[in-house]
Image: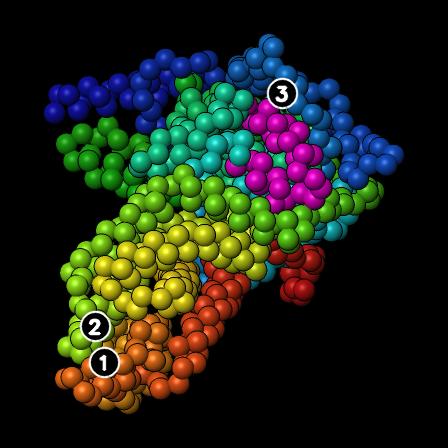
Amino acid sequence: MEEIQSQSDHYRSSSSSASSPASRVPSSNFFYLRKPGSLRQPISFEDSPDWDDTDIEVRVDEGGDSINAATTPASPSLSKLNSGSLPSPPLPERAVVARKISGASLAWKDLTVTIKGKRKYSDKVIKSSNGYALPGTMTVIMGPAKSGKSTLLRALAGRLPDSARMYGEVFVNGSKWHLPYASYGYVERETTLIGSLTVREFLYYSALLQLPGFFCQKKSVVEDAILAMSLGDYANKLIGGHCYMKGLPRGERRRVSIARELVMRPHVLFIDEPLYHLDSVSALLMMVTLKKLASTGCTLIFTIYQSSTEVFGLFDRICLLSNGNTLFFGETLACLQHFSNAGFPCPIMQSPSDHFLRAINTDFDRIIAMCKNWQDDHGDLSSVNMDTAVAIRTLETTYKSSADAAAAETMIVKLTEKEGPSLKSKGKASNPTRIAVLTWRSLLIMSREWKYYWFRLILYMLLTLCIGTVFSGLGHSLSSVVTRVAAIFVFVSFNSLLSVAGVPAHLKEIKIYACEESNLHSGTFVFLLGQLFSGIPFLFLISISSSLVFYFLVGLRDEFSFLMYFVLNFFMCLLVNEGMVLLIVSICQEVYWSILTLVSVHVIMMLSAGYFRIRSALPRPIWMYPISYVSFHTYSIQGLLENEYIGSSYAVGQVRTISGYQALRNVYDISTSSSSKWENLLVLFLMCAGYRILVFALLQFCVRKKFPGRRFFRCNRETNNPR
């Protein structure tokens, strides 16, 4: 108890020192629990200058496709923020200046976003938000969890889901228009990278997918993106990220995801949580890199949950949200001044972002309630009694009547009263080029990821070797017919079941597709063709190697044409199986459920394939119709048996012989026609095409909803008349 008492005295003493000088003590009871330790001196507002409006000069370059906004010399507040109380890390002295980017001004007025069923108490996620972003600056959207940060960012980028409705006005260079392709980049909070490629290879393939022109023209774009994100030391290193493939640290991986969008040299860059899962050092390095990128002229808008004092000093403007309400929009130091004017000054030795979140995060009310329950014996924590809802209302009311809100409205009027040049699309790579790029990239990935591909080939060879040795030496007597049917059934069924080893690779391909398709870097048709063409060499290698081992160990018909049909039949079986795996993975979206579903489907198909019970004797509801007709095992096994037994004869005694069909008809249902095996092969081909058509429809309508892409909205000022 004495230890608890001493700690409470320490917190109280530190909090009392944080409230000095006395003139800055708020009227309401506001208590902070802070970690002890010495930090930098806080910003002092005693001699802060008046907050003047920042003038903007809009200059249109002849022949350009964007607007260049040159601000007047930095305001005293911002210069003081970057050089005085909140120092920001300087850029390296010998750093190479990246190529200038022509930015674009972005302004939003009375922006409201509603999502049906998003919240229990209200479907308004964003409520009448106003703000702007200028070229060469970093505008951060800050707030606690579920405050609407990502929704506002998606609304500005035109990437809201179908269930959302947006009202208000969004201006790009003063015009009510959306951002065309390649004029902006959007980086998700969690992006999927290809770990088996180097940074330079990954960016080069991304440039080939996004931009038109020749291959050699993309190299300079990639090098500029590497320079802009300070990835020169990691350009030739594997991205990694697998348990068996070490690669880049998490901070550098985040840089790579941003650099992927920079290959198009966008005018505006949206980033959702650039500091997501980064430590303090990586976060600071990331923000310094983004600050350097903004200095090239790009307009940066990103969300952030909280930051250190050094990172906070790099921001140009802050949009502070809580429960969808805008509590402040303006320059960074003006936000601190706003909290001080509202009666909540930032205590000494506390990060400004921590101070903001402490004041407006409703989750702290639960902490306060817990602290009050601990005052039975001691009243040390009884002063933690501020209601967060009161603080939010106070800050919102103070901001609406403040000079900062008026300055923001004045700037929005200046940015929207005159229309600048509309941003133009830079063109796209053609679909044949994208298919070729995706095919070659997938082949390169297959050659490097031994766990998903080469190890899978080894498993096929080992299983085939086991099956072949078990059924070796059958001969061609009549008594070997039943055993040979069992060998073919086991070969087809068990090798098809090994496709579960490719589930992680297919799941990764789906995630990469969803990430690239959301920014129109790829397409569903392009992805499926590239995936099919890249998988054909690998599947053919499996089919010919496994077929040769099985064919000669078991001792099937010794003719080249029959051997080639066996290889072709098994190859089509693998193609159909890969399409089914891709379909199941697209539905389940998880490794565990995908493997469980795939194994269950294979078992059901094997039961109805006609081996355990002749197909004509199966129960007609469900098992015969439709399962036996849907099972690709049925057509593959039937074609292989017809290839082996149609046209052959077996001796019965010394005089009499019977045909292969007569010897097999009591064991398995096959046709007497010599062309029946080719009909079964055609059915397998149609099933291969059918599965990929189903995958196309599923990716087009289901997966794209889970990963919302570019969906542009026309905004209307009347909130009761959405378009």
Magenta-drawn stretch contains 569 = no
Q: Mark 1 points at which residue?
A: 650
Residue stretch in magenta: 202-230
Residue displayed at 24% across by 64% down: 555
* Type of the residue with mark 3: Ser
Q: Which one is nearer the viewer's eye here, 257 or 321?
A: 257
Residue displayed at 44% across by 42% down: 445
Kindly report the distance in space between the C-alpha atoms of the residues bearing marks 3 and 1: 98 Å
* Type of the residue with mark 2: His
Label 3: few (<14), some (14–19) or many (≥20) C-alpha neighbours in 10 Å: some
Which mark's residue is nearer the viewer, 2 or 3?
Answer: 2
Counting from the top left corner in percent of width and height, residue 178 is at 70, 51
Label 2: few (<14), some (14–19) or many (≥20) C-alpha neighbours in 10 Å: some
Label 1: few (<14), some (14–19) or many (≥20) C-alpha neighbours in 10 Å: some
In the rendered structure, are the residues bearing label 3 and label 1 in contact, judged by CB atoms less than 8 Å apart? no
Residue displayed at 19% across by 69% down: 475
Q: Quadrant of the N terminus?
A: top left
Q: Mark 3 points at which residue?
A: 77
Q: Quadrant of residue 368?
A: top left
Secondary structure, magenta segment, majority class: helix
